[in-house]
Image: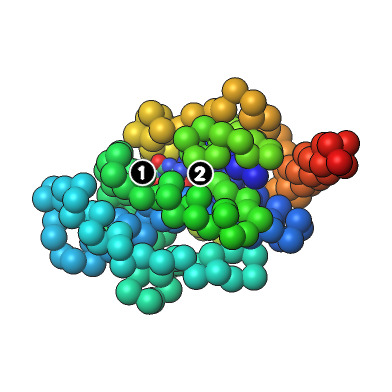
């Protein structure tokens, strides 16, 4: 199952919850771009000097460790879940995500995991470039203002002011532009606009869609036997 959408659309948290409810595992493809970026940062070589070959070499130090309902990103064996969410990685990851060699590397890692486990994969292009035959494709969208507000509530743990939301909205819109070429809605994806949905409503809706897709699959198998 593939969940795609722009930054801060709630893809990862939704994918994590949905995977938990279905007994699947969540794969966060953005975490692989981030971990490859983190591995390059750890060398101390400034990002202006990174070539695709150099980043790909560093990416070989990245592994995904299976957990009960997810995979933990590791660099040289160390868990980097926190490190890859920091400002250093966030500031350089769009550069790395634009390198075709790194895109192929991420796509191969994600496909490899999906051959061994039932997965909910989230990213920008999972339903197009990586799993064109996914059993269910969802494309999540929400107003930039609302995405910015949710991100700030999570980060600050309080209600943000309108000025704070406006600043964050501007950053988000800039990030959307940086990621625009690789953010692609598959023609057969189901569009879910979460602007007016709570987290629970959003997860319930996608779990219901996933259960319907699984029923259809089973009927297809039964009908064919
Ligand atoms: O979703 P995120 O913020 O963790 O993504 C990190 C970066 O990786 C961001 O620049 C978008 C990019 N990305 C991508 O190009 N394709 C994906 N499938 C996932 C993430």
Q: Residue furthest front?
A: 225
Where 142 sits versus 105, above or below? Answer: above
Q: Is residue 6 left or right of residue 197?
A: left
How far across and how far down the image is residue 101, in percent? 28, 44
What residue does disc 2 label? 123
Residue at the (49%, 29%) spot, across then down: 184
Above or below, 24 relative to 2: below
Quadrant location of residue 220?
top right
CA neighbours of label 1 inside 10 A, class few (<14), some (14 to 19), many (20+): many
Q: Does the residue tagged 2 have its C-beta within 8 Å of any atom of ligand 1?
A: yes
Q: Relative to 97, does residue 132 appear above or below in the rendering?
A: above
Rendered image coloring scheme: rainbow
Which quadrant, please, contains the N terminus? Answer: top right
- In the depicted view, which residue is nearer to us: 203 or 61? 61
Q: Can residue 30 be spotted in the picture?
A: no
Residue picked out by circle 1: 103
Per the rendering, the mark at residue 36 is none
Name the spot of residue 90 as percent of width and height, x first: 35, 52
Residue that appears at 41% across and 66% down = 63
Give the number of marks: 2
Residue found farthest to the bottom = 77
Q: Is mark 1 within 8 Å of ligand 1?
A: yes
Ligand 1 shows up in the quarter that is top left
Point out residue 107 in the picture as x, y percentages from the top left corner: 43, 46
**157 lies left or right of 183:** right
Tell me which residue sits at (64%, 29%) in the image: 189
Q: What element carries label 1?
A: helix
């Amino acid at each position: 199952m593939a969940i795609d959408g722009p930054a801060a659309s709630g893809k990862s948290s939704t994918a994590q919850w949905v995977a938990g409810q279905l007994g699947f595992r969540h794969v966060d493809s953005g975490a692989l771009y981030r971990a490859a970026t983190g591995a390059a940062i750890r060398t101390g070589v400034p990002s202006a000097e990174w070539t695709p070959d150099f980043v790909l070499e560093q990416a070989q130090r990245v592994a995904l460790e299976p957990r009960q309902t997810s995979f933990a990103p590791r660099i040289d064996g160390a868990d980097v879940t926190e490190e890859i969410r920091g400002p250093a990685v966030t500031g350089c990851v769009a550069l790395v995500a634009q390198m075709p060699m790194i895109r192929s590397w991420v796509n191969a890692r994600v496909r490899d995991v999906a051959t061994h486990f039932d997965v909910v994969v989230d990213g920008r292009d999972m339903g197009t470039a990586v799993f064109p035959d996914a059993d269910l494709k969802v494309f999540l969208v929400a107003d930039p203002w609302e995405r910015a507000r949710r991100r700030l509530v999570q980060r600050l743990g309080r209600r943000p002011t309108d000025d704070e939301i406006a600043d964050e909205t501007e950053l988000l819109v800039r990030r959307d532009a940086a990621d625009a070429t690789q953010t692609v809605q598959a023609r057969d994806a189901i569009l879910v606009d979460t602007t007016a949905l709570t987290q629970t409503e959003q997860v319930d809706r996608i779990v219901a869609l996933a259960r319907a897709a699984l029923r259809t699959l089973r009927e297809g198998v039964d009908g064919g036997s």
